[in-house]
């Protein structure tokens, strides 16, 4: 009875805490926040720290901040690495969502990696409770993605979900509402960006920032031999030390992207080898559901299908399916629909 009353005055909140972006879904309002998981922290000489900015405002400070300001990504490779900074980030998110200080905290559903230890789950709960949550529902990320897409995961049929994020990727096989096989590995958009930085440095002597490499990937990156035009990246020319702009085309960044596709394909095929033959046969028919923000890269679905020989489908909003699945677990969201 009490939870019903409290729920009526504090809407349920679903959160997908990603390495690059955090998405927040509020019951009855949909996805209200999609912002970089970044916090700018000022530290004075006595060691006291205060938050200067979060989200896009903090991301814009990266590479431009003075020595006493740190731009922090509290989540790396899908794992929380700075709980104190994350708590401050989440508290500000909560205040932004409700536009006032909370006297009744919301119920929160949060996506976490598969097979977190009991201690890790407890720390996640405590962090969100400290940030203002009344109750915390922990949802495994692969299950959240499958629910958010609208897969019939409770059926006796195998489904494969490949989630490609900024810091990590995962390949998961589900059946009868449970995870049958899952593997997470530290490969994603950040890996591609690091490879682009190394390639431009080696081939052109140009040192670019991570943000510059990401911008090039988003502008002209393709998993297929397609020409998406050109874009300009700016950095420091190492032989001279002077700033320099360089024209980058699709073929300049294709190598790192193809490496990502091969690793995703290898992990998918290895997963098929580990599951029972009947589930493997199901997946040969149902194919792969590709989710995550990086899954929107041009041609990634087609290239993955060519490497694996499996059909690949992408949801209408692949970056939002995990938070939609968390919202559905709270009873406040509807699954996304697959666009074939």
Image: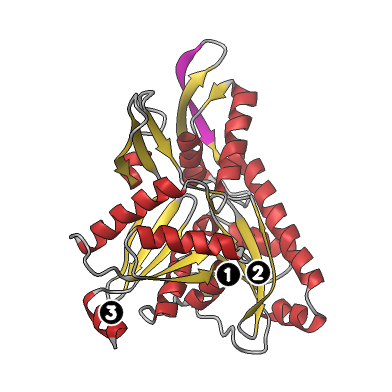
How many other residues sit within 10 Å of disc 2, few (<14), some (14-19) or many (≥20)?
Answer: many
- Separation of marks 3 and 1 at Cα, in angstroms: 27 Å
In depth, the one of 193 and 45 nearer the eye is 45
Q: Quadrant of the N terminus?
A: bottom left
> How far across and how far down the image is residue 252, in percent?
60, 36
Task: Report the disc number at residue 7.
Answer: 3
> How far across and how far down the image is residue 316, in percent?
45, 69
Dot 3 or dot 1: first in sequence order is 3
Q: Which residue is mark 1?
A: 142
How would you classify the magenta stretch by its main secondary structure? strand
How many other residues sit within 10 Å of disc 1, few (<14), some (14-19) or many (≥20)?
Answer: many
> How far across and how far down the image is residue 27, in percent?
31, 75
Q: Quadrant of residue 256?
A: top right
Disc 1 on helix, strand or loop? helix
Q: Quadrant of residue 300?
A: bottom right
Is 192 located above or below residue 8 in the figure?
above
Residue located farthest toward the left when viewing the structure as drawn: 100
In depth, the one of 48 and 14 nearer the eye is 48
> How far across and how far down the image is residue 235, in percent?
47, 24
- Separation of marks 2 and 3 at Cα, in angstroms: 33 Å
Callouts 1 and 2 close, C-beta under 8 Å: yes
Q: Is residue 45 visible?
A: yes
User: Which contiguous range is marked in magenta?
Assistant: 241-248
């Amino acid at each position: 009875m009490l939870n019903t009353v409290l729920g009526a005055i504090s809407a349920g909140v679903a959160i997908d805490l990603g390495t690059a972006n955090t998405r927040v879904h509020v019951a009855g309002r949909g996805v209200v926040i999609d912002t970089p998981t970044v916090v700018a922290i000022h530290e004075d000489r006595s060691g006291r720290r205060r938050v200067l900015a979060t989200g896009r405002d903090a991301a814009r400070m990266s590479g431009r901040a003075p020595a006493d300001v740190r731009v922090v990504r509290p989540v790396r490779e899908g794992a929380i690495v700075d709980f104190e900074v994350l708590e401050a980030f989440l508290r500000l998110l909560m205040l932004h969502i409700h536009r006032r200080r909370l006297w009744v905290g919301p119920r929160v559903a949060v996506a976490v990696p598969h097979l977190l230890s009991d201690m890790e789950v407890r720390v996640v709960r405590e962090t969100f409770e400290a940030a203002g949550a009344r109750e915390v529902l922990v949802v495994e990320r692969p299950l959240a993605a499958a629910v958010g897409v609208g897969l019939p995961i409770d059926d006796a049929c195998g489904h494969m979900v490949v989630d490609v994020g900024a810091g990590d990727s995962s390949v998961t096989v589900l059946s009868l509402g449970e995870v049958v096989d899952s593997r997470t590995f530290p490969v994603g958009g950040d890996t591609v960006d690091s490879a682009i930085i190394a390639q431009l440095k080696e081939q052109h002597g140009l040192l670019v920032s991570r943000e510059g490499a990401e911008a090039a990937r988003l502008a002209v990156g393709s998993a297929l031999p397609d020409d998406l035009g050109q874009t300009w990246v700016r950095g420091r020319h190492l032989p001279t030390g002077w700033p320099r702009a360089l024209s980058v085309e699709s073929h300049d960044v294709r190598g790192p992207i193809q490496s990502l596709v091969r690793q995703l394909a290898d992990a998918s095929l290895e997963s098929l080898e580990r599951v029972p033959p009947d589930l493997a046969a199901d997946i040969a028919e149902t194919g792969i559901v590709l989710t995550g923000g990086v899954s929107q890269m041009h041609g990634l679905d087609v290239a993955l299908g060519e490497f694996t020989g499996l059909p690949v489908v992408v949801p209408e909003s692949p970056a939002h399916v995990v938070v939609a699945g968390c919202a559905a677990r709270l009873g406040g969201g509807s699954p996304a629909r697959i666009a074939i």
